[in-house]
Amino acid sequence: MTQQELTAYIQSSFEGKLTLLDTGRAEPMFEVRPDDLLEVARRLRDDLQLKFDYLCNMGASDTRERLEVVYSIASTTRRLRMDFKLVLGYENPAVESVTPVWPAANWYEREMNELFGIEVKDHPDMRPLLLPEDWDQGYPMLKNWDAPDFVRMPEL
Amino acid sequence: MGLIKKVPVYTESIPGGALVATSLEAVLNFGRAKSLWYLLFGTACCAIELMCTGASRYDFDRLGMMFRASPRQADLIIAAGTITKKMGPRLRKLYDQMAEPRYVIAMGGCTIKGGPFYYDSYSVEKGIDHIVPVDIYVPGCPPRPESLLEGCLHLQEKVRRQKLSEWQEK
């Protein structure tokens, strides 16, 4: 399956739950609504044409207008790659956990929860991962984050 | 050189040999300065230079510096590498476990003032001198082995100048 065939297949068989974004990259990037995430993830993994069985990478980003959660997945048997992302607002951001679908998401979701404050629903093991145990200074990866000893790079 | 001074001794020849008189302080300081065992504490890229200094080309052992894997056997922490805010309390705990007198060398920019992580970093401690008292600062990113050796020679000089009465207070 080529990239064009993959894009066409996903657009035809996911009832509009994955919308193609124009990124100018070779691999397709889709957007998914937060409510559809778990169902779409399961179908991407279990569809016999796709079999996306490998979560390469996932993470969140703060664009100053919204939060985005990006998932990069690959199929080891069908030799496919694709990305999809979902968009969240700053008010109580929350996503479903995809750890039941791809166990690799476990630590990524813990990190995301800790650094961005994105709540991950139904995560099996939501303990702090990276920050000190007594951390109480909020979510440091948000762009508007600040702390008493945080020094911003001066404008040059 | 002139950096390492000799132990002050008074010698007097007697039949069949010589009589040597010196101060207890000088002898103890001589022994301490020549056997600074350091704790293995490499947390980032400075540790590579520390390993290089310990290996055969630069040869730390000739200064009497042997690495120890336990803080209870070490006299010196060479803090080699970035100390994050999570690592800070661990560093303090290791320092507290060492027997006195104990010394700290801050190796590299990160341990001195946060180094390249001074700006825009939420996780890096801006200098280890507000966690543990630092004796010698060795600047560089990372410092070359020559710099570290120079720092250790300066520390030896500092140890040699110690007074017996100061040991309790340190």
Image (cartoon, rainbow, N blue to C red):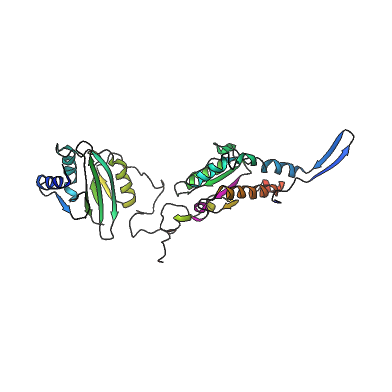
Q: Please state the horizontal and vertical placement of residue A37, each as a whole percent of the image.
A: 19, 46
Q: Position of residue B136 (x, y in %)?
A: 60, 51
Q: Residue at x 54, y 53 (%)?
A: B129
Q: Is A51 placed left or right of B41 in the picture?
A: left
Q: Is residue B57 visible?
A: yes
- Quadrant location of the C terminus of chain A in the rendered image: bottom left
State the extent of the magenta-drawn residues as a range: B102-113
Indicate yes or no whether the magenta region holds residue B141.
no
**Residue lying furthest right:** B15
Foreground residue among B47 and A59 = B47
Report whether residue B170 is seen: no
Say whether residue A107 is left or right of residue B3.
left
Query: In this picture, is A25 found above or below A44?
Result: below
Q: Is residue B48 left or right of residue B35?
A: left
Q: Pick the quarter of the image with the N terminus of chain A.
A: top left
Q: Is residue B43 left or right of residue A34?
A: right
Rendered image quadrant of residue A78:
top left
Q: Quadrant of residue A87?
A: bottom left
Give the percent coordinates (x, y) of residue A98: 23, 42
Residue nearest the viewer, comparing B115 with B86:
B115
Q: Residue at x 18, y 40 (%)?
A: A42
Residue B151 percent across, percent down from the top left: 61, 50
